[in-house]
């Protein structure tokens, strides 16, 4: 507890000192940790919705015209962010936490048409670029029909890029991949949109989840599975209690996958991925706290027993207001995986970004 508290305070002090310098000249300071340090005492910089490309200017203009209909919680400006390809994130910005939104599409073609484009004058999309969406399999995108632009149309293509980078950089700190299984779409939320052709999301059956689990093993050569973690113990937690956390040296060059969302409840027991859960679950070692401000003290109490993912910013708000309160709370909490949309500043919005201080490379 003391170690993490001191690390958090030092990170915030260093952050305050260097912030002005960083905003003038963006420079990355990597930090080396000894291989003997337990993995739960690392701090990882992560990207949120790591696959995402910003909507086109025509899409943003169209959505902004109708923003009063959406309510403040669904203001379309929240969609106006974009990420570099995963390999570039990992190489140039030491991103070691990734997030992929995954939709089920067992027959193919369910998310091929982009219905919003039918409502936007002069909006043209090269549908041939989206041909992989016609094939059966799991798809990667943010909001079907609206915020669909992505570096990776399929889960397989994203996993293959992660795998290629991991194999080419065998000494990297562990990469934590958050898979958010999406079980709703705009077609589920509005009858009018369904009439306009906006599809509902397809639920994940037990068989679908088993297929997804198999894909992880097939396409991630360096995967560190939940089964490997247990090493014959009765649960993931028992392994930690009786044997301790693995060290950085033991997990260098490896990739962890953690499943998020209600669909994870039916995830197979003998699995390749971990699952976000709660402290009552003996097979839960990952917890999710998206907002670190209110539960900051609670997170600080849990980090010895769990790895916790939180967010430094959300909905472009911090970037537009140059606001660091949430980032400071995340650092002080000791949360091990801190996710951001701004590992580099978006100068069109402001100077906000998360400097690489106290994060493992």
Image: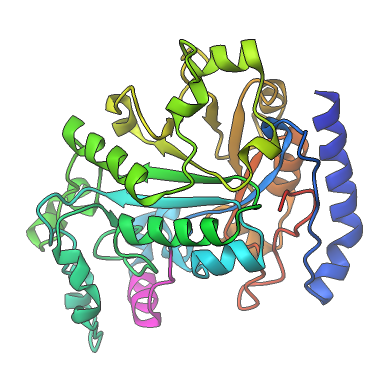
- As rendered, which of 77 and 255 lies closer to the eye? 255
Kindly identify the residue that appears in the image at 92 percent across and 57 percent down: 17
Where residue 132 appears, x then y in whole percent? 21, 68
Is 298 located above or below residue 117 in the figure? above
Quadrant the N terminus occupies: top right
Kindly identify the residue that appears in the image at 55 percent across and 39 percent down: 290
- As rendered, which of 107 and 122 lies closer to the eye? 107
Q: Is residue 169 left or right of residue 150?
A: right
Q: Give the mark count.
A: 0
Kindly identify the residue that appears in the image at 16 percent across and 69 percent down: 113
Kindly identify the residue that appears in the image at 83 percent across and 76 percent down: 24
Q: Is residue 114 visible?
A: no
Q: Which residues are magenta?
A: 52-65
Q: Is residue 152 left or right of residue 172?
A: left
Is residue 214 on the magenta stretch? no
Where residue 23 appears, x then y in whole percent? 80, 71
Residue at the extreme bottom: 122
Secondary structure of the magenta portion, mostly? helix
- Where is residue 2, by image quadrant? top right
Is 170 located above or below residue 88 in the figure? above
- As rendered, which of 213 and 7 lies closer to the eye? 213
Where residue 225 appears, x then y in whole percent? 45, 33
């Amino acid at each position: 507890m003391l170690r993490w508290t001191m690390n958090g305070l030092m990170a915030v002090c260093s952050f305050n000192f260097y912030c002005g310098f960083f905003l003038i000249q963006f420079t990355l300071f990597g930090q080396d940790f000894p291989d003997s340090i337990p993995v739960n005492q690392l701090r990882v910089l992560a990207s949120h919705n790591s696959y995402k490309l910003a909507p086109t200017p025509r899409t943003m203009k169209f959505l902004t015209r109708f923003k009063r209909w959406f309510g403040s919680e669904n203001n379309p400006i929240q969609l106006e962010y974009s990420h570099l390809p995963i390999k570039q994130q990992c190489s140039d910005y030491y991103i070691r936490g990734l997030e992929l939104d995954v939709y089920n599409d067992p027959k193919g073609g369910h998310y091929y048409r982009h219905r919003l484009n039918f409502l936007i004058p002069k909006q043209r999309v090269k549908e041939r670029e989206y041909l992989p969406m016609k094939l059966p399999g799991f798809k990667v995108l943010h909001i079907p029909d609206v915020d669909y632009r992505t570096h990776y149309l399929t889960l397989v293509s994203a996993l293959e890029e992660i795998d290629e980078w991991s194999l080419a950089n065998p000494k990297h700190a562990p990469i934590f991949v958050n898979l958010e299984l999406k079980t709703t779409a705009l077609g589920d939320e509005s009858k009018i949109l369904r009439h306009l052709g906006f599809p509902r999301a397809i639920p994940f059956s037990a068989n679908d989840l088993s297929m997804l689990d198999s894909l992880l093993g097939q396409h991630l050569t360096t995967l560190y599975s939940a089964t490997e973690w247990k090493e014959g113990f009765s649960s993931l937690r028992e392994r930690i209690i009786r044997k301790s956390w693995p060290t950085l040296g033991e997990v260098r060059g490896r990739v962890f996958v953690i499943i998020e969302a209600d669909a994870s409840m039916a995830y197979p027991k003998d699995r390749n991925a971990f699952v976000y859960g709660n402290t009552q679950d003996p097979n839960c070692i990952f917890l999710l706290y998206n907002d670190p401000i209110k539960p900051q003290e609670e997170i600080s109490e849990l980090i010895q027993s769990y790895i916790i993912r939180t967010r430094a910013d959300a909905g472009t708000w911090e970037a537009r207001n140059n606001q660091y309160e949430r980032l400071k709370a995340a650092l002080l909490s000791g949360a091990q995986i801190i996710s951001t949309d701004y590992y580099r500043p978006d100068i069109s919005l402001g100077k906000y970004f998360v400097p690489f201080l106290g994060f493992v490379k």
